Image: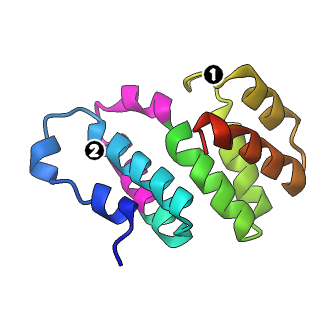
């Protein structure tokens, strides 16, 4: 069975070559879909694709959207018991260089000091489409 994230992550590279950073955004969307589908292994694979594209010289503007991939990674880290990794993703989303999150999500992430509070932030973000 093919997940939605597998299908969306396989968009033709040649069709996206001229789309500055959109390949990373497409991979980030695929990571989000994989998270929603419960495919945590694919979350990490698509996230790696997104970060690889965003590290490409000249595509720094797209990095303001890292929350698209960091929320699924944060939730995946929590599922695997990697609290420190989850906290790193939370801190990265709060970086001033990132697109601002809705105030209630930002407040929850800033206040989160343990796995339960991070999980609550993810649950708060879910109905808003962030996780």
On the image, the x and y values in percent for residue 129 come to: 57, 38
Q: Is residue 32 shown above or below 3? A: above
On the image, the x and y values in percent for residue 115 come to: 85, 56
Q: Kindly state the secondary structure of the residue where label 1 is placed.
A: loop
- Observer-nearest residue: 127 or 24? 127
Q: Is residue 53 shown above or below 3? A: above
Determine the residue located farthest toward the left in the rendered image.
Answer: 14
Q: In this view, does 85 lie to the left or right of 32?
A: right
**Secondary structure character of the magenta stretch overall:** helix
Residue wearing tag 2: 23
Residue 77 in view: yes
- Observer-nearest residue: 53 or 100? 100
The reply to whether discs 1 and 2 touch (Cβ–Cβ < 8 Å) is no
Residue 9 in view: no
In the rendered image, the quadrant that contains the N terminus is bottom left
Residue wearing tag 1: 96
Q: Give the range drawn in magenta.
A: 46-65
On the image, the x and y values in percent for residue 36 come to: 55, 57
């Amino acid at each position: 069975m093919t997940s939605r994230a597998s299908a969306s992550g396989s968009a033709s590279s040649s069709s996206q070559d001229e789309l500055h950073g959109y390949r990373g955004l497409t991979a980030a969307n695929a990571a989000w879909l994989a998270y929603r589908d419960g495919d945590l292994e694919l979350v990490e694979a698509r996230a790696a694709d997104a970060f690889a594209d965003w590290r490409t010289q000249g595509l720094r503007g797209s990095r303001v959207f890292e929350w698209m991939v960091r929320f699924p990674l944060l939730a995946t880290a929590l599922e695997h018991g990697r609290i420190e990794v989850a906290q790193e993703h939370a801190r990265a989303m709060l970086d001033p260089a990132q697109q601002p999150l809705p105030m209630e999500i930002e407040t929850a992430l800033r206040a989160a000091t343990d796995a339960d509070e991070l999980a609550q932030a993810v649950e708060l973000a879910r109905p808003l489409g962030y996780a």
